[in-house]
Image (cartoon, helix red, strand yellow):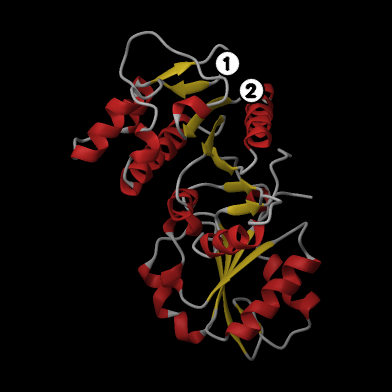
Amino acid sequence: MLTDASRPLVLLIDETTEFALRLTQSVNRGWSEHLNMKQADSLSKVSEHELRDVSICLFSHAHAAELETRRWPEKTAFFLLCDETDERKVSRYLPLSEFVTHIAGSLTESTLAPARRAVMDMVLGFDRHARDRYVRKAIQKGLAAGHTVYFMPLMPTYLIPDAELSENGDTLSDLLLALETGIEVTEKHLGHVCFMHSKGYFQPRLPERADDLISAEPETLERLILLLRARLEKSGPEHTALIACDSLPLDTVGRLAAHCDTLALDVPGTDMSALTRQDIDLMLTTLPSSCHVRETVDPQ
């Protein structure tokens, strides 16, 4: 089956929540190998990051004016949801198969096979041994595919898997300080604090103090992740990044994961798992549809 990133994204903007949810579930259940549908009751809830991947936008009359306020990819096809069907309209009352056939007819060959872009993933594992296995396997998989891989461990230094010291140079502590004090920082500065690990991937030089990363303000960590995203996008599609979290508040993890393409996580199988599950579910509700959640720490 194709991944979310490789299937054309259909965005449904409709205030009729029950209809929108039912249609989205039906399309994703019956046509999951061909389309990936997301829904929202307002375009204001859709980020610029999500918009850039939209192949088809379905919208009601109530949201028509909103479309002009956002920047869309040139490839995006628009369909008005109404009571009739023609070239750029689609009836709410069409049988599902006809509905999908009508909108899918707008997809071009280039849309069906979108260009690959740099990918940034995150892993949150409550079982540290399982998480470290995930990190090693995911990095090895990226390297085996010929990608340049960046590993960003957001955790105390004594928990970083396969940690290595590097030659003299700026450390992650220096970069965090610059981000906290408002000094102008670009993705090039992130490159200056990274070195090539003996296993072939890039990683920032270790912070000067063990808890520098987990004691940083959430806003600072978010700026760090945005720098990583910017570096990937300027470097090209054969670059990937993996972020591993430990000892961070879940609301901070959610804030950072919102900028990632995938969040892989597991839930601890302990007496506290129900309470942890509740906290995780609350965190997941804050994520945009552009972040695909995979509840496993087994890299695919």
Q: Which mark is residue 83?
A: none
Q: Residue at x 67, y 86 (%)?
A: 92
Residue lying furthest front in this view?
A: 271
Q: Are marks 2 and 1 in contact (CB under 8 Å)?
A: yes
Q: In this picture, is 24 found above or below 189?
A: below
Q: Nearer the viewer, residue 10 or 130?
A: 130
Few, some or many C-alpha atoms within 10 Å of disc 2 (few <14, some 14-19, many ≥20)? some
Image quarter (top left, top right, bottom left or bottom right) of the C terminus = top right
Gap in Å between the C-alphas at discs 2 and 1?
A: 8 Å
Specify which label sits upstream in the sequence, 2 or 1.
2
Callout count: 2
In the figure, residue 65 lies in which quadrant? bottom left
Report which residue position mark 1 lands on. Answer: 200
Q: Give residue 57's position: percent from left, percent from top.
A: 56, 69
Question: Under tag 1, what secondary structure?
Answer: loop
Amino acid type of the residue tagged 2 in the rendering: Leu
| SS at circle 2 | helix
Give how far across and how far down residue 222 sits, in percent: 37, 45
The residue lying furthest to the bottom in this view is: 83
Instruction: State the residue in front, 272 or 127.
Output: 272
Q: Amino acid at mark 1?
A: Gly
As drawn, is 157 to the left or to the right of 238?
left
In the image, is residue 139 above or below residue 34?
above
Locate residue 147 relative to residue 98 in the image: left or right: left
Residue 287 in the image, given as x and y percentages of width and height: 51, 59
* Residue on which the image places disc 2: 143
> In the displayed image of the protein, which residue is found farthest to the top?
167
* Rendering coords of residue 127 (x, y %): 65, 40
